[in-house]
Image (cartoon, rainbow, N blue to C red):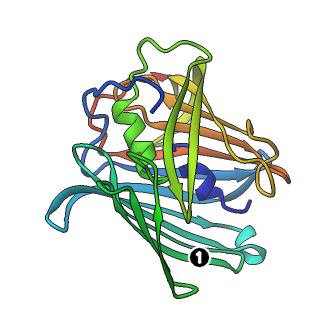
């Protein structure tokens, strides 16, 4: 159950040839996910909201991701997470990342300012009252901006099963090589905005670090819509203890038409 919003957002985080495509999202897009533990127990909810703003005179998208436990689970393991990213509307590169979490008493409050020109990250750890300036990789992404960057720049029309894309990611105080493997295409049944529908999807395998949270590096599977929106529909994770599943429940503000078949 622990860190389920982190699990969700991290999947959506160059050795691969990227092609700038038509923007997959717009100001006002909003998602809500229902999260279950071990296939049946309602664990919580998560939302992603994007708005266009100004940051230090630059045009940016501001994304806010929230996650919280619900029902009986919150009485013995309460989660309240908030993630924010400010990234350039043209390049998709982040300027600021905020992570403020409380997961069963495990708390973090970190703010990162990215200098994309000089490849630096200023990490302000508010919990411990420390500030560090660290080196980053070129065109580095944070764990939220990576999701939107891939939606806009990963051309999926001609991808083949087994193709792998990589991104430079920076998380907390570390550079992290993010890899995403294409598994194939599948039509799945989902409940969206109160209706049972069938959606054509692309399946991916984000590689994660095995250890305390994940059972192994291939513990995640991600389904996104096989259209211009590339919206996340389902995520499954095998954890060190049990499993976690996130399903898109509601959405609004999509930029492109969303083709579904009613079940």
Which residue is drawn at the image coordinates 41% and 50% (left, top)? Answer: 145
The image quarter containing residue 226 is: top left
Image location (x, y in percent) of residue 75: 74, 77
> Is residue 140 shown to the viewer in this render?
yes
Query: In the depicted view, which residue is nearer to us: 188 or 121?
Result: 121
Residue that badge 1 annotates = 108
Q: Is residue 216 left or right of residue 68?
A: right
Quarter occupied by the N terminus: bottom right
Q: Secondary structure at mark 1?
A: strand
Instruction: Give the crowd class for mark 1: few <14, some 14-19, many >=20 residues within 10 Å.
Output: some
Which residue is drawn at the image coordinates 22% and 43% (left, top)? Answer: 90
Image location (x, y in percent) of residue 112: 43, 68
Query: In the depicted view, which residue is nearer to us: 194 or 42?
Result: 42
Does 253 sit above or below residue 16?
A: below
The residue lying furthest to the right in this view is: 241
The residue lying furthest to the bottom in this view is: 129
The image quarter containing residue 71 is: bottom right
Q: Is residue 208 left or right of residue 99?
A: right
Which residue is drawn at the image coordinates 50% and 74% (left, top)? Answer: 110
Image location (x, y in percent) of residue 144: 45, 53
Quarter occupied by the C terminus: top right
Image location (x, y in percent) of residue 49: 37, 56
Does 184 sit above or below residue 89?
A: above
How many numbered markers are drawn? 1
């Amino acid at each position: 159950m622990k860190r389920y919003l982190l699990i969700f957002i991290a999947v959506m985080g160059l050795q691969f040839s990227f092609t700038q495509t038509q923007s997959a999202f717009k100001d006002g897009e909003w998602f809500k996910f229902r999260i279950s533990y071990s296939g049946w127990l309602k664990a919580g909810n998560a939302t992603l909201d994007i708005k266009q703003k100004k940051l230090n005179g630059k045009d940016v998208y501001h994304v806010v991701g929230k996650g919280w436990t619900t029902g009986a689970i919150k009485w013995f393991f309460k989660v309240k997470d908030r993630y924010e990213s400010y990234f350039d509307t043209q390049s998709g590169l982040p300027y600021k990342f905020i992570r403020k979490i409380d997961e069963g008493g495990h708390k973090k409050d970190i703010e990162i300012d990215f200098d994309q020109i000089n490849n630096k990250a200023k990490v302000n750890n508010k919990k411990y009252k420390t500030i560090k300036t660290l080196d980053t990789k070129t065109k580095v992404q944070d764990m939220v901006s990576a999701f939107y960057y891939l939606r806009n720049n990963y051309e999926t029309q001609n991808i083949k099963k087994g193709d792998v894309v990589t991104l430079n990611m920076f998380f907390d105080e570390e550079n992290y090589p993010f890899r995403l493997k294409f598994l194939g295409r599948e039509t799945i049944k989902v409940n969206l905005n109160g209706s049972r529908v069938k959606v054509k999807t692309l399946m991916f395998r984000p590689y994660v670090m095995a250890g305390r949270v994940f059972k192994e590096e291939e513990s995640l599977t991600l389904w996104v819509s096989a259209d211009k929106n590339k919206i996340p529909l389902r995520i499954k994770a095998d954890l060190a203890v049990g499993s976690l599943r996130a399903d898109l429940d509601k959405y609004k503000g999509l930029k492109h038409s969303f083709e579904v078949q009613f079940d």
